[in-house]
Amino acid sequence: MRANALLAIGGAFALSACATTAGADSASASDGDKSYDIAEVPFPSTYEPYPGTPTALVGATVYDGAGGVIENGVVLFSGGKVVGVAEELSTEGYTVVDGTGKFVTPGIIDIHSHLGDYPSPSVSAHADGNEATAPTTGDVWAEHSVWPQDPGFSRAMANGGITSLQILPGSANLIGGRTVTLKNVYSRTVQGMKFPGAPYGMKMACGENPKRVYGNRGRKPSTRMGNFAVNRQTWFDAIAYAEGDRKKRNLENETLAGVLDGEILVHNHCYRADEMALVMDMAKEMGYKVSTFHHAVEAYKIGDLLRENEVCSAIWADWYGFKMESYDGIPENGALLQQAGACVVIHSDDENGIQRLNQEAAKAQAAGARMGIAIPDAEVISWITLNAAKAMGIDDMTGSLETGKMADVVLWNGDPLSVYSRPEKVWVDGTLMFDAMDPKRKPVSDFELGQPGEGDVK
Amino acid sequence: MSALRKAIRIALTGTAAAALAVSASAQDFAITGATVATGDGSQPVENATVVVRGGKIVAAGAGVSVPAGVAVLDGTGSWVTPGIFMPLTDLGLYDVGAVSNSNDIRAGDSPFSAALDASTAVNYASQHVAVSRVGGVTRASITTAPAGSIFAGQGAVIDTGSDPQPVVKARAFQMVALGERGARLAGGSRVAAFAEFANALREARDYANGRWDAESAHLTRSDAAALGPVLSGAQPLYIYVERASDIRAVIGLQSTYPNLDLVLVGVSEGWLVANEIAASGIPVIADPLDNLPSSFEQLAATQSNVGRMVDAGVKVAIGGLSGGITGPRTAPQFAGNLVALSSVPGATGLSWGEALASITSIPAAISGYAGRYGVLAPGAAGDVVVWDGDPLEVSSAPVRVFIDGVEQPLSNHQTRLRERYRDLDESDLPKAYDW
């Protein structure tokens, strides 16, 4: 509970947050055919969609996630895929769900979560999100820390409509390791949750956390300049590795080489505008691309640079003041970025916030409206759907309601940008995985069986 | 966001502001034609009037006439509520959470515990006070956190006004942590926490009775003295627990220490023992939406906790919203979520009126200010917030805030940054000259 908040007030916010992403079109730092072969990646996804029913959602207001809206639309899905989205479509052969007065969006995507690697209960035996033993740990993979029984996954679905999420290592390290993208579907194994075909991400972190963690131990880095020194030398070593024959296995350099090859996306935790500008120059120096700055509370100060460099900002609506580098956070961050033509993603970095990303997006929209920046509802929905999918490299598969994409769909009982609305039904790959109207159609993790409150509304 | 809302904003910030410039003294005014929610648990009333004179509410509701000689603000299209009262927060006690020199929330290295007095540190000029004020928060109770002892110290009731007198009541309550937190602070187990608690009250009684023995005492003299009002019931004792069994243990303290004026804090599993809490008469300050088994004392946590306790007859305030993440300004959002819960089969939420009361009149009452704060009723303080829409909706925000009838400034570090970076034009001079 947040009552830890109650007594941990003032909240020195710990290490959890951070991120960076590399663009899907990152330039390769090496030529030739040294490309990273995803087929050789171990721990492959075993996720397969569960059997679904051909379904027609009829009569609802449909936000397609790509900026479009259809009043009183029809959404058809079958075989796990979106079959059609239009004002009128034949529903013959489909189970019809009446969405009159309700709203449909793509499944909500959280680009920044630590579910599974900092699960509930948040006991030290479960704290598997930061390999804070060396400032660069590109060799660690978040998926090896994910506990698939985290009760947080179910809350994210039932209250937040989350269907896909990226789990990142924490931000203690400059290079925190590989991220993993999951379908929000319980499984006995993490492989059974892994989003098939999703590219890996690599977590990096700017600023206070790495220099504090290692500086407190009397080792490098202890300053922001130390952060950059360690980063650059690590990159130069990785480039040398990537330009070689790559035969000697080196897990860290393999991850970094994957970034240089443009196949692993950089998700860079970074708060301050000046540091983000330095990181973008470092990326140019090394020949990689940052996909996304995560947290990015000062992104509004450099919306032009972010637009020019095609880097997304994954932000909270209004978090600020919990650490020095978050002091200049303002609620208008997202709207100012949108006004500058830069890419906006709303993220959670929090097991509670992930349950209300729709509300956070609405707050960011409203703050903009109050300063005269009007952003249509349908575009705001893209902040938590298609924009997140793009930044994670999965937008060709999910993130919008387009024919042929995964049928990851949320039926809301009202306007998803209103505090009064809740997910009523959530489909993942066309399978109904949560139904507020059916007490049994919701997941209960192993941990909760036989405990007080098992199966309760949460 | 709608054109309508924009128009409302212009109306309020234009004509009304001209009629009523920000002043250090209370103004007499009436807001007419607004949707008024009084905070007493009732539903909002449309086309109603609120009258404030001499810093106090004179009348609020439909059919209220405006006395001669008071400024009239056209509230058409806007909403009016009492100011939000956030219990158990940290306003004025820190500037940056992780910058220890700016943070007075913890004093783990102090030899003192119960004697710690939060009112001595309150910074009325803190940005978080200003940001909360912009969010419609006008009153709060604040406390330090237990760090070197199970006793957190004595909390204070404050207002968020821009004037230099924030403290409404110093030493308003004492707080103690039992449960897992108390166990860790006391030496490793709940057993130790209860022993520390019982010993502290015993030493406080000895001190009060003139039988203080400094040689054998565990408490300092100051701490023993500070617990005297707790023992007599003159000062409420807030007890932080989460687990159902711990809640029952706290209720059991009523028979051991009949004078204690108890308030339960946290109480994630309260719904499991809601009837017992209701029978005890102990009010609750709860986290609004806590629904994860974050610890083994919160296994039964559910968003329906607050609603179920309220239905059982427990007096429940939303509290503990603190820091810059889910700070006091987010109280309306949490209250709105409790309303939304009412539409979920099997879940228990609050009515709209109950939800507003849980962040206004009820926390005020638990804090000792029933009828005086957190409510638009005759005689109550003129803490009035004018909103551009439904105050519990995430798209809404205050457009004017009054405390004791004094209109408050709504600018702060954040609003200045917003204006500086409204554009990124530095063609003439660096942004540093744009102020």
Image (cartoon, grey):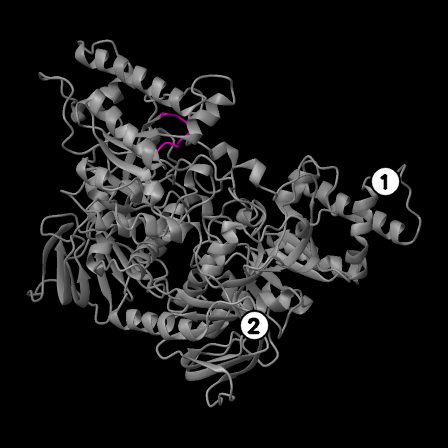
Looking at this view, is A374 or A405 the one in front?
A374
Residue A201 in picture, x, y percent from top left = 26, 31
- Magenta residue check for A169: yes
Q: Chain of mark 1?
A: B
Residue type at mark 2: give it: Ala
Residue pointed to by mark 2: B26
Identify the image quadrant of residue A144: top left
Residue A147 in picture, x, y percent from top left = 39, 36
- Our reading of the magenta stretch's main secondary structure is loop
Quarter occupied by the N terminus of chain B: bottom left
Q: Which element carries disc 1, helix, strand or loop?
A: loop
Closer to the eye: label 2 or 1: 2
- Magenta residue check for A393: no
Which disc is residue A46 wearing?
none
Residue B236 in picture, x, y percent from top left = 71, 60
Q: Which element carries disc 2, helix, strand or loop?
A: loop
Vertically, is A268 above or below B1? above
> Are dots 2 and 1 in contact, CB under 8 Å?
no
- Residue lying furthest front: B428
Vertically, is B66 above or below A150? below
Q: Residue at x 52, y 51 (%)?
A: B322
Looking at this view, is A314 or A299 the one in front?
A299
- Span highlighted in magenta in the image: A168-174
Identify the image quadrant of residue A230: top left
Q: Is residue A130 visible?
A: no
Residue pointed to by mark 1: B217
Q: Is residue B302 left or right of residue B114?
A: left
Q: Residue at x 58, y 36 (%)?
A: B101
Mark 2 or mark 1: whose residue is earlier in sequence:
2
Q: Is residue B69 left or right of residue A167?
A: right
Residue type at mark 1: give it: Ala
